[in-house]
Structure formats: structure tokens, C-alpha cells
Image: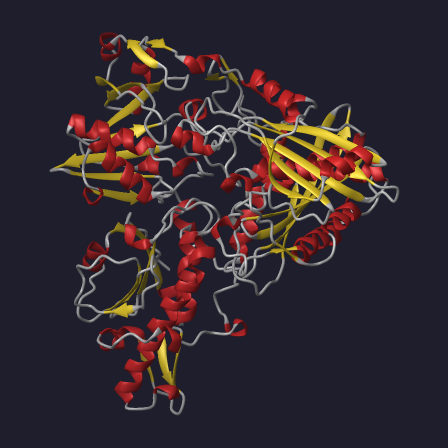
Amino acid sequence: MNHKIENVSRRQFLKVSGIGASSFVLASSLAGYKPVWAQTSQADVELNLFVSIQSDNRVNIICHRSEMGQGIRTSIPQVVAEELCADWDLVSVVQGLANKEYGSQNTDGSRSIRNFYTILRRMGASARTMLEQAAADLWKVDVNSVYAEDSYVHHKDSKRKVSFGYIAEAAGKLSPPKAETLTYKSKKDFKLIGKPVTGIDSAEIVTGQAEFGQDVRLESMVYASIERSKVLRATVKSFDADAAKSVKGVIDTIQMPEQPLPVMFHPMNGVAVIADSTWAALQGRKALNIDWELGENAAHTSADYIAELKSRIVSKGKPIRVEGDVYADIEQATDTHSATYSVPYLSQAPMEPPAATAVFKNGICEIWACTQSPQVTQQNVAQALGIESDKVIINVTFLGGAFGRKAKPDYSIEAALLAKQLNRPVKVVWSREDDIQQGFYHAVSVLHMAAAMDTKKQITSWLQRTAFPSIMWTFTGTVDEPQMNELSLGFGDLPFAVDNLSCETHKATGHIRIGWMRSVCNIQHSFAQGSFVDELASKAGISTYKMWHQLLGENRLVDPKTDDFDYQNYGEPQDVFPVDIKRIKHALDVVIAKSGADQPTQENEGWGICVHRSFVSYCAVATKVKVVDNKVTVLEMHSSIDAGTVVNPDRVRAQQEGSMIFGLSLALLGEISTKDGAVEQSNYHDYQVLRMHQCPKIETYIIESDAPPGGVGEPGTPPVAASVANAIFHACGKRIRDLPIKNYMSV
């Protein structure tokens, strides 16, 4: 089987694929969910996701999302091919370019399948219907007497069959069926959806043939490495261009445009060294000897900032969701408990640092980049160059990890600016040090929790406060408190059945670039909530599992929206994706039953658990640790996930495993600290990620569900930190409320 990646526009695709009058092209406008159409004579019309069927029976499917290891270039064709009734061995995938006609191409928010599952099935069903009609016309029989299977249309009343390729031209001349007339497969008949299909790109990736952003090579290309300001918006006072140019292989030095406010996706201030190799460019950087004007952000030291937030978080904040009277109940309660938690700045730290290659010629800029957001890249590059967005072509390579970092196109803008100035192809290469010291960071955060308990050890009040610099500060420069979309990520949507509830925020301004990271604000919110549930269980003298069930209460649908809290629900309608207590509890029940987390352990061992709803999916994690001489060893981790309808269980399982490893890295090791405005860490030696010897046995349980598809890439991360911290407490009695754990124990 030869599944080939190509980055082409629709017009180019028709040309390179040899599609002409004998082929069938199917397209759909995702943005407005327009009716499916098929017409070979409109090859010049740019549309969205489409299918073509060639005369040799090859089925080509466009993927408009970015592949970064999650398997989306397999899952999207799976859904289309299922309803098309195509032979999977005849399916190829073509990577789509940036095109606003697609709707959102941002591969983030765990929404690729969630947002496109229905339209993908519609595309496949419409194509199948037209092929069946073409076959019925060929045989002069009723269309109800034919059916498609494995890239052939069969006649029920005889042994006749005809290939998709043979009738492609005839099918392409038919009027497309109306959406309401389409029929779809029942779940019991699925051959691809819900099956562990091997990744289309696996062979290319494991043999080194896949092209990542760092792999792009163009004729006459030069390399650029940029010495950027380590303090946000520090400006260049002077630099030694001659010294840099004296390094063998260095061609030129170029000062980058001054970064404006708000910082948005603008490149940081600095000086680019242009050379004939990456090595020469890096060596030239060392000779620049830049003198910086550091500016006001040089006063930012993260340890002091966390201390400041902690001093304020214990006072009453701005309420966003209130039920009953928390303060009166706590005042008169039989017993109370409170705790404050913190999470430091964090870096996405993907294995492949950012890279982009650009060519500017005849007013057109073409870019090859490992980007999660081709449309955003297109728009921002166009703005930086002062040209129309349709003059910018974005080719999406494979991404060697991303976790949100590559949703920001600053590195592509750098390449475009330099290519225009140099009038030749330029590849901008970020080093690991660049990415960790000048990236976009997960916000530092502090949370305070308090609860009241009655004489029966029932929780009657729950108070929670959160403070962290908002991502919106990056885009406005003025926002100084968490925003509704961030508070909708596991905070204001707290699903507990308590009589008195208050969810509050405190102000926190930005000092370094804040950006999205895998599971975003759910990281800190789940850590604090899951840890506090465990603390309350210990105080009440019951198991954490029972405390979770007590707090969750009766099965019901929760609507967190209030006059002051505009709940976002990950952009999904609540009638389709409600906050469902039954599903939350079931995810917890499954992980407890499968892992044995409710069973006794050996001496110095302990289990910790947590459950969390994020990206409209439900995930529970159980972690077992051993603590001896203040050294923690994670022995095993188990997760259950209810993500609704699952397209590819193999990819879901891999995503869960990756999420748990990612979450464990953050819990044990993750910490970005700043001193005098600059990030102190620089590479994997001091911004550590999980090593193989630290990785425990991992088990994943996918819960069968007929619900619409939920998110998969991120929900496995949030419950991890609390489960680990809770396990440590149950193993040795030590309570950790400030991440990372390495600051308190050997890991």
C-alpha cells in the first residue's frame, strides 16, 4: 500500500493526480455546510475537503488538518471511506493548503473529528449515492437494487459489479443528492469507523521519509538563526555585525523589525544571522555581542510573582458563578478546610523545534512550515508583508510534536520577512534553546480552595479562586484577569452537587508571552480540584472515590451558565454535549474497577485518583506510586476515557498514553522560571521531560459510547497531576500543593 503525502491546492491536485474527464471529484463547503456537489468541469474552483476517484479506482481524500502524531491524516479518510464504502487499500491522502473555504483549519482544541465527523460522513454518503446511481443507470435497473462495497457497486439480483473508477465519469455528471435524502451506515455495519486502522503515514515516519518542518530543502536556500531578546520586548541598542560576518559561512546579518504591542504573533526583537548552514548561523550568533535595552519586563521574577498571587488569592475575589451563600455557611460550619495550590510557567517543548522555509517572488510568498494553523499563518504573514492573503501559500509539513506551540506563526513570519529582504529562499531554524527561552508559555497560576463540612461529614460549601495571566493579554496587552473562555476550562463548569458554591477570580497581568498548551487551563484547575477532593476525603475519613461520588451527586445534566458566567463548553452546544454527571461517574468507576485502585497496597505504596471533563470528553486517571527515602517512583498509571463515538481506537489509545506521559512530565518535572524577566531554563537538561526509566506501566480503557465524538488529544492530561500528588500522600503522608514534585522529592 502506497499512501503518499502531497501538499497541493485543489487545482494542482487535479493536475498532479491526472484527474480529468474520466474522474469524479466530490467537494463540500465546510464553513457553511453547503450541499455536496460533484462536477469535473469546475477544476478551477477552490473548495474545501474533497474526494476524487480516478479511473484506476484510486480514491484520493484531502486532509485539511495538520498531522502531528495524533493520526488525523488517517482518521479523516477513515470516516469518508466508511460511508463511501471504499476499499481502504485504495485510499490515499493529500495534504491541503491553507484555505479559508475550509472553515477552521486550526488543529487544536481536540476538535478535528468532533467538528467534522458529520460532514465527513455526509461527503462519503453523497459520493456513494452518486456512484450507485451511475451504476444503476449503466445497468438500467432500479437504484434500490444496487449497493456499494469495497470500491465496487454490486447488483443485488445478479453477480454483476462495476468499479468506482469505471463509473467515475458518469457519476461526476449527476446532480448531487440532497442532504436529507442520504442514508448512512448503522454502527453494526462499520468496517473502518471504530476499528484500529494502522496509520497511513506510519511507514514514512518510521523509515525517515516523512518531511517535517526541519527537513525542508530548496534550491539556493540559505539558513537563518535569530538571536532574540530574552526579556519580552527588550530592544537592540547595538550589535557587532562585522564579528558575526567574519565567521566562516555567514552571509549577512539583519536586524528584525521592532516588536509592537500587543505582542500577538509578532516576531520578537533580535538580529538574524544568515548563513550557508545552520551551524554557521548558530556560530555567527555567538559573535553578535548584542547590547540590549531590557525595558520594564526585566523586573519580572516568577518566584516573586507566585508569592504575590498567593498573598492575594486568600482574599475574596470577583465571583463568576455563585449558588447559595458560601461565606455564611463556612462561617457557621462544623468543620472547614482550605488549601492553596500553584502551577509554574510551562513550555510545550515539542521534540521538533519550530522551523519555516519561505520564498518571496513576484509578490507571492510561499511557505513550508510545521504549523498547526495554516490559515492563521497565511493571514499573519500577509499582514507582515503588506500583501493580500491570497498571495501567501502555506504548505503544511508533518509536525514533530506541537502541543499548542506551533499554533503561533511567529517563526513563519520571520522566514517570510527575511525571504522578502534577501530575495532568495530562507529557512528559519529555531534551536531547542530558542524554543524554551523565547516561546509562548502556559500561564503561571495560583488557586485557593475552601470547603465546609457538616456533622455527617457531608460537604455543604465549595469555594474556589483562580488567578493567572490570560492568553488574551498576549493579544491585547491590557487584559489583566482570566477570561470566560479560560474559566470555562474546568473551573466555572465545576459539576459538584453542593448547596453553596462560589467560583471567583483574581487579577494577574502578563509579563512573558502566554499561549496555548495541551489542555490549557484544565491543567491547573484539575490539579487543584482533584487534590482538594482527596484532602477533603482524608479529613472526612472516607475514600477519595466515595468523596468524588458524594460531590458529584445524583445523575443529572449540569448547566453552569449564569448571568455572570457565559459558559463556552468548548464551542459546542450544550444540548448535544451536556455536562453529564453519569458519564463523569462512569469514567471514574471504570478506572477504579480496571486498575484495582481501591485495593490495599504494599508498604510505602499508594494510589491516587482524579476525574475531569474537558473538551466534552470524560477522563479518569488512577496512579500508583512508591515512596522510599523521599524518592517517588511511579509504578503504574491507568486511564479511562469516554470520548463518545471513537473513529480509531488505536489512535485514541496512543493519544491517552501520550497525554498521561505529558501530564506526568508536567507533574514531576515541568517548570519554567524567570529571573529579571528572562527564562532560566534552556534545554531538556533543565526543562526536563519524562525519561524512559521514569515512565511507568500504562493502561488505557476506552469506554464504548454512541454519543457524538468528543475530544481526544487533550482530556488525558488534566487529571494526571492530582492523581500523582494524591498517590504520594497515600504512600507517605506528604501533601504536595505546588508543582513540580521534583522541588520536594527525588523523582
Q: Quadrant of residue 3?
A: bottom left
In the image shown, does 409 or 653 lie closer to the viewer?
409
Q: Is residue 140 above or below residue 578?
A: below
Q: Residue at x 35, y 72 (%)?
A: 126
Q: Residue at x 37, y 15 (%)?
A: 234
For residue 637, side relative to residue 136 (left or right): right
Q: Residue at x 35, y 65 (%)?
A: 90
For residue 601, side relative to residue 323 (left or right): right
Q: Position of residue 108 (x, y in %)?
A: 44, 45
Please identify the quadrant where the N terminus is shown. bottom left
Q: How is the image coloured?
A: secondary structure
Q: Quadrant of residue 360?
A: top left
Q: Position of residue 199 (x, y in %)?
A: 45, 54
Q: Is residue 376 above or below residue 79?
A: above
Q: In this view, which residue lies farthest toward the left?
A: 362
In the image shown, does 480 or 244 lie closer to the viewer?
480
Please identify the quadrant where the C terminus is shown. top right
Q: Is residue 174 in view from this perspective?
A: yes
Q: Position of residue 644 (x, y in %)?
A: 56, 59
Q: Is residue 6 in view from this perspective?
A: no
In the image shown, does 294 or 450 lie closer to the viewer?
450
Q: Is residue 716 above or below residue 695?
A: below
In the image shown, does 297 or 404 lie closer to the viewer?
297
Q: Quadrant of residue 29?
A: bottom left
